Amino acid sequence: MELLNSVSMLREVDAAVDFARGWLQLRILLSVGYLGRCSVDRLVEVLGERRKAILDSLRKMRAKGLIEGEGELSLTEEGRRVYGTLLSVLGSSRRASAGTTLSRAAAQDIPRDVLRFSYLYDVLVALGTSKGYELPLSTLASVTRLSPTTLEDYLKPYVEDELRLLKRVVRGGRLTGRRVFYRLTDEGLKVYHKLPDYVKYRGSLVAMVLRSLTRSGHPRIVLKRVALALAIGSAITSALVAVLAPPTSLVVALTWILTVSLIALLVEVTY
């Protein structure tokens, strides 16, 4: 349950800080929250990043309402809420006292733990909504927007340690070559069935239709496959309209427009 609560809470944080693209923003949030107040120079020293990169991230964080101040930076009310959620996930209630410094190692390691939980959530949802509860590593890497090597590094504790949520399978063939797959274990399936995504969509007819059409229930996989289907369908429809005479061409065009509208409605209602 502790793991379940952790990965669920991180979905809320991910809405504020995109983990896949906001690595530096996440580290800044944790650093400013830990230190209480600090300057840009202090962040450069603590995080070991270029000043320009930190200033760019601070601009984005101000736009999101997470950071305030110019010379002296601090978290906004929303920033403190997100920071508090992260501390809860990490099982920490510590606050920095005046003059306490945050080591570079801590600034690096804490976000890594947060990211690991976030990527695990994506993998559980992707596998839980796929046929046989199994997917190739390449597909999971695409879902999490990570390289296969990096994703395997994040998933390793859930394959080899005591809490085995995943099973790693290597298959090979003369034509396909060696491929790595991941599958949910019985324990992993139990965790998936308690996730908010499963609870929300298990009784949804619309979600079941989309899952049948795309063979997945993970939003990124669904949207990617829907986009591919629409692109191919649009190309075919355009070719038919060009070669068919009216009124047949008009019927084809209107049918495709209605189909696109229906799919868009299904996606909007589900996600």
Image (tube, rainbow, N blue to C red):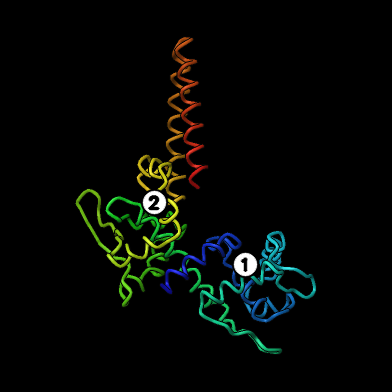
Q: Is residue 88 above or below residue 246?
A: below
Report how far apart the C-alphas of labels 1 and 2 lie in the structure: 34 Å
Select label 1 or label 2 by which is in front: 2
Residue located at (39% from left, 55% from top): 126
Could you say which quadrant of the image residue 80 lies in? Answer: bottom right
Q: How many marks?
A: 2
Q: Is 247 on the left or on the right of 83, as rendered?
A: left
Mark earlier in primary sequence (1, 2): 1
Packing grade of label 1 (10 A; few <14, some 14-19, many >=20) is many
Vertical position of residue 181 compared to residue 255: above or below: below
Farthest right residue in view: 71
Picture residue at 47% right of the left edge, 25% below the top: 256
Please give the label number shown on residue 202. Answer: 2
* Vertical placement of residue 71 versus 264, above or below: below
The disc labelled 2 sits on which kind of residue?
Arg
Residue topped by disc 1: 25
Task: Return the x and y of residue 35 as percentages of the image width and height.
Answer: 67, 81
Q: Callout 2: 10 Å neighbours few (<14), some, many (20+)?
A: few
Give the x, y percent position of residue 211.
38, 44
Q: Pinpoint residue 227: horizontal percent, then vertical percent.
A: 47, 39
- Residue type highlighted by circle 1: Gln
Q: Which image quarter: residue 72?
A: bottom right
- Residue 205 left/right relative to 79: left
The location of residue 194, given as percent across then percent down, is 39, 63
Quadrant where the image shows the N terminus: bottom left
Q: Secondary structure at mark 1?
A: helix
| SS state under label 2 | loop
Taking depth in this image into account, of 89 and 114 the one nearest to the observer is: 89
Residue placed most toward the observer, 28 or 164: 164
**Tags 1 and 2 touching, CB below 8 Å:** no
Residue 41, numbered label: none
**In the shown orientation, is residue 105 left or right of residue 184?**
right
